[in-house]
Amino acid sequence: MSHDEWWRRTTVYQIYPRSYKDSTGNGIGDLPGIIEKLDYLAELGIETIWLSPIYPSPQEDHGYDISDYRNINPEYGTMADFDRMLKKAHDLGLRIVLDMVLNHSSDKHPWFIESKSSRDNPKRDWYIWRDGRKPGGKAPPNNWKAMPGGPAWRYDPGTEQWYYFHFLPFQPDLNWWNPNVQKEMYDTVRYWLDKGVDGFRLDIFHAVYQDKNFKNNPFSFRVLPSENSTASLFQNHVNDLHLPETFELARNLRKILDEYDPPRFMVGEITATPEICHKYMGGAANDGLHLTFQFNFLRCRFNARQLARQIKHNERVFMHPALPTYVYSNHDLMRIFTRVSENWDKMKVLATLQLTLRGVPFIYYGDEIGMSQVKVKLKTSEDPIGRKFWWSPIKQSKYFAFAFSRDGCRTPMQWNSEPNAGFSPDEEVKTWLRIGPKYKKVNVAIQDKNPNSLLNTYRTLLQVRRENIALQAGSFEFLHESSGALVYKRTHPEQVIIVALNFKKKRNFISLASPRLELIFSTDIKAGETDAWKTDATLNLKPYEGMILREMQSGS
Ligand code: TEU
């Protein structure tokens, strides 16, 4: 097995298709809109695009409720648009990764409509149906809870049985114990691979299988879900999450992807410890999912020691040939820029960190220009999770990086200062979510012209990463950690790179035994103009400065 596949060195950019670019003027983003912006992405310097679901869907969970796995949502365009997008992306050297929801479909999927129609329908067993408990079967079959809370079962008066769902009631779980379901989903994966997609992001992968005997989950004192435990909402999810068969499914999918050339990859969304995530990757055998999301930076905010602890944890668990991922934001979380209190300097330090660690970085659309979490009303939220928790006095928490309405991180991309932020060609149209109120100052067009902008910092960082093999494939070692600064070294047979990050709002002097260094990047664009960045063997970091240095080869 080669350990040199392209995806190991790639940088991923997540697009939420509904919010990227509207080409028709209906206030909803679409595929032709994305095609228009592929040049922007190629020029930004990211390499892989992950698209949140683009399949037909009643859009109750905005695509995470699929009603046809092998087609395109007509609101977003046609299959011909998809083919055009894939071709143009590939021509530009970009890769396309699709979101695959194996766990559940929409309740409007024809399979579920059939399944629900009668107990003896051939599709009945494609979903998970059970008799209720108590006389008359009026209590749910067991104590399993759905991820957002409440029983994971919904009663169907028509057939007098309950069906199981791990997320929301309109997202019934597929029955993976049924060989016909397995075959259909494997064929779906092949269908898109045959079309030429470069991989998949697998939605709530850890929830795909449940205990065949429907055993109750044991009690736990834990309420909130976290990466550190399989318990939440007062139960330990031993019988509905992380089943041995799910780990086997990871290996089966890997075998399918391994048949393809050029290589493809999968990244699993798994809410679990790094150790469990590593198990999904096949552990030492490395024959499972290629990557899993690490969400362990979410609780760190701008704290060097906390970040260092998580990096070391990942380095310990995801040893070569495994690789960690580094995620700051996504379509479910509070935007990173809001979490650093909208401080541009801090954001640049974090961008430098994310793009110089050993692992695959995932950048969420709009984070490259510092889009903020937009405040929304829970009651009128587009996101069903927001509406479910409309009564909650707490709407969001910077510490937990969560917001009850996920609308706030899904607002339209801010392209320019025109009405509707250049997102929609119709300036009057009401966009599906409101435009972030700061768009006149925070947008691509303005930042494009400013060499010191966050956008240009990302561009330069992505370029530096592409041009320096040690940043893509070098080993990792800390040289200095304190609450004020982190310094680390990336070593590759061809070169050595050193990264120094100042987490303090004051100057920081760090002595380095390293011999001859050249400055190849600083968050302070003027830093390279003089020699002030270094005196003898000491790095002179300005407040919140991030630097990338290259060891000069002897003789150069
Ligand atoms: O998310 C599941 C998940 O693990 C959570 O991040 C969850 O969305 C959040 O805690 C709810 O507040 C995945 C998708 O990323 C999400 O958008 C979908 O809604 C969900 O699965 C169901 O498909």
Image (tube, helix red, strand yellow):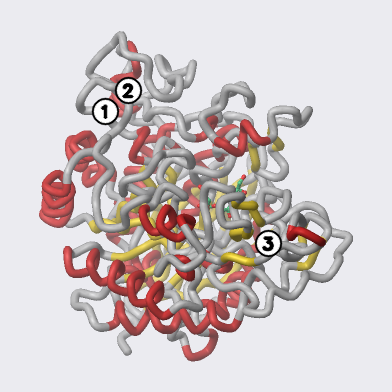
The mark lying in front, picked from 3 and 2, is: 2
Determine crowd level at label 2: few under 14, some 14-19, many 20+ residues with C-alpha closer than 10 A.
many
Secondary structure beneath dot 2 equals loop
Distance of label 2 from label 1 (alpha carbons): 6 Å
Taking 524 as reference, is 357 above or below it?
A: below
Q: Is residue 313 visible?
A: yes
Label ID, residue 227: 3
Which residue is nearer to you in this view: 414 or 170?
170
Which residue is outermost to the top? 428
Q: Quadrant of the N terminus?
A: bottom left
Which residue is disc 2 drawn over?
A: 27
Which residue is nearer to you in this view: 531 or 477?
477
Residue 252 horizontal/vertical position (percent): 40, 83
Q: Are marks 3 and 2 in contact (CB under 8 Å)?
A: no
Which comes sooner in the sequence, label 3 or label 1?
1
Q: Are marks 2 and 1 in contact (CB under 8 Å)?
A: yes
Q: Amino acid at mark 1?
A: Asp
Q: Amino acid at mark 3?
A: Glu
Residue 237 horizontal/vertical position (percent): 72, 68
Question: Who's the residue at 50% across and 58% down the image?
Answer: 499
- Is the CB of the residue bearing disc 3 within 8 angstroms of ligand 1? no
Q: Is residue 340 visible?
A: no
Question: Who's the residue at 18% across and 48% down the image?
Answer: 82
Residue 23 horizontal/vertical position (percent): 21, 28
Which residue is disc 1 drawn over?
A: 22
Determine crowd level at label 1: few under 14, some 14-19, many 20+ residues with C-alpha closer than 10 A.
many
Secondary structure beneath dot 3 equals loop
Q: Quadrant of the C terminus?
A: bottom left
